Amino acid sequence: MRGYDLVAFGETMIRLSPPDLRRLEQTTLLEVNVGGSELNVAVAAQRLGLRTAYVTRLTKNPLGRMIANKAREHGVDTCHIVWTDEDRVGIYFVEFGASPRPNAVLYDRRDSAMAKIRPGEVDWDAVFRGARHFHTSGITPALSSTAAAATNEAIRKAKEVGLTVSLDLNYRARLWTQEEARRVMEPLTEQADILITTEEDTERVFGIKADSYERVAELLAERFNLSAVAITLRETPSVWRNIWTAIVLAGGKLYRGPEFEIEIVDRVGAGDAFAGGFLYGWLTDGPEAGVNWGVAISALAQTNPGDLCWATKAEAERLLKGGGLRIVR
């Protein structure tokens, strides 16, 4: 049997959200979802047609099983998950706002099962056998020093056996400082082939700033000798109406994705859906296809509640062909 097209490695948490734009301190109900950057990527890529696997460390309890079950529901292989009888599954809360109050996130993930992962716990030889590509993000090494070491081990092993590697910079100020992120992420990015980021994260982690998004991409490609740099771009006229697109620099050529005005339902996981779509296009038809699929599938992903992408390939194709807003019968 052929190996995976895409292997993703990171933490998934249980997400709890008050309904109806309520504040956390006023709500009497919480909606439950599953989400985490790398699983979100694997799901989007799987829904477009890649064969994907997700590697993480989970506690053997109902919450851990909920996460694994949700991954399998989307067709993502979970047979390489590391299970533990100890530790805990991380939780986070999302409080949805409306202009002028922005969305807010509260983490409860300290000492999670994934934060305690160590090098040597994952059989990367088995995971990577016949695989094509490995993906992770800056969230995973931010969890702990052992998670950072495990991330480095995974990237190093992926490169040794011939996989291409992508990183989503994904800076989280509530997990580590800019200085800590730079110290860890610079050597990891030097091993990567593809970097997915935002202009803001690039400045905060690497201190790179320029007068255009295109120049930021060029500086990143030059500094880290990257095959491709993808930058997602969001304008926010209001909390619930955004303009969404992306650019990709690959092989010295710039590719611009389509631009969509989105009526936001849930923007959490949008960048991850872009990464999944981009990697699908990149692996099947190159960088131009990557930026188009990435922008389309992530635009659609923001029209559904929850972190995970529920859009289909047919919907993304229709959107890229200029599909309108009339009811689909």
Image: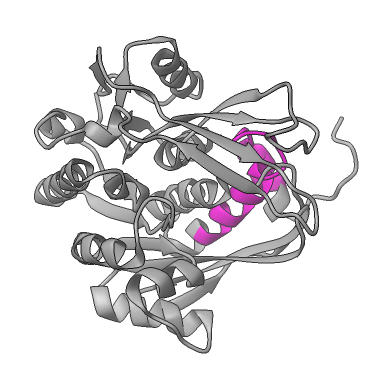
Nearer the observer, 48 or 219: 219
- The image quadrant that residue 93 belongs to is top right
Q: Residue at the location (39% across, 24% down)?
A: 89
Q: Main secondary structure of the magenta part?
A: helix
Q: Residue at the location (41% across, 49% down)?
A: 284
Residue 299: percent from left, percent from top: 66, 51
Nearer the observer, 1 or 188: 188
Quadrant placement of the C terminus: top right
Q: Residue at the location (49% across, 47% down)?
A: 272
- Considering every residue shown, the one lying at the far front of the view is 25
* Colour scheme of the rendered structure: one colour
- The image quadrant that residue 55 belongs to is top left
Query: What stretch of residues is rendered in magenta?
Result: 291-318
Nearer the observer, 325 or 265: 265
Is residue 175 in the magenta section?
no
Against 137, residue 75 (above or below) is: above
Residue 253: percent from left, percent from top: 43, 78
Quadrant placement of the N terminus: top left
Is residue 306 in the magenta section?
yes
Left or right of 263 in this view: 71: left
Q: How many marks?
A: 0
Q: Is residue 252 visible?
A: no
Q: Is residue 94 visible?
A: yes
Against 322, residue 31 (above or below) is: above
